Image (tube, rainbow, N blue to C red):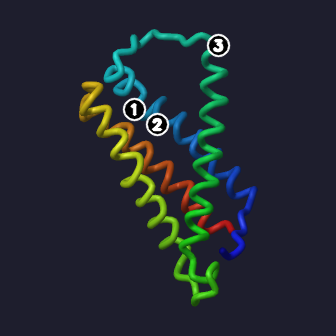
Amino acid sequence: MPPIHLNGFAIAAAAASTIVIGFLWYGPLFGTAWMKEMGVAPDFKPNPALLKRAMLLMMAGALFTAVALACGIELCRPLTWRAGNDAAPAMYGLCVALAAWAGFCVPMLLGGVAWENRSWKWFGINAGYHFVTLLTAAMLLAYWR
């Protein structure tokens, strides 16, 4: 297997972008609708200890996702395999993000609709979030090698 070169700064930026998008997505953009679909009261305030734990888990998950995307992007590049010239970075970012979203996120969210009686609105909010975060992180990683 060829050596894979990962940029730690790009991975950190991709993980951070996921957190920023999540704050906006589930806050001012779709927070009220998402809370309604989840059955959470509008005045709900989480326990600070639980919030801290959730943030740490979210950061760890964002970091793992960024590393996986970076590896996927590198493995798609012909130059990694010494098999030709690379195409535009956007091509690799888009393909890897779309494959991750369609192959992993969408099927798991469909399980929520099928087995947990979640609404299609819930599905749309969450699927949109995953698509935007994966695409943003993958583009950062594809362009910032």
Mark 3 secondary-structure assignment: helix
Of label 3 and label 1, which has the lower sequence position? Answer: 1
Q: 44 above or below 7?
A: above
Mark 2 secondary-structure assignment: helix
Distance from Cα at disc 2 to Cα at disc 3: 21 Å
Question: x, y percentage for residue 106?
Answer: 35, 46
Residue corresponding to mark 2: 25
Question: x, y percentage for residue 22?
Answer: 52, 37
Tag 1 near tag 2, CB within 8 Å:
yes
| Residue at far front of view | 1
Mark 1 secondary-structure assignment: loop
Distance from Cα at disc 1 to Cα at disc 2: 6 Å
Distance from Cα at disc 3 to Cα at disc 1: 22 Å
Residue corresponding to mark 3: 48
Left or right of 116: which side holds 28? Answer: right
Camera-nearest label, 3 or 1: 3
Name the image quarter holding the N terminus. Answer: bottom right
Left or right of 73: which side holds 144? Answer: right
Residue corresponding to mark 1: 30
The part of the image, by quadrant, that contains residue 54 is top right
Left or right of 58: which side holds 117? Answer: left
* Kind of residue indicated by mark 3: Pro
Q: 65 above or below 93?
A: above
Q: Residues within 10 Å of mark 3 (few under 14, many from 20)?
A: few
Question: x, y percentage for residue 95?
Answer: 44, 67
The part of the image, by quadrant, that contains residue 46 is top right
Total count of labels: 3
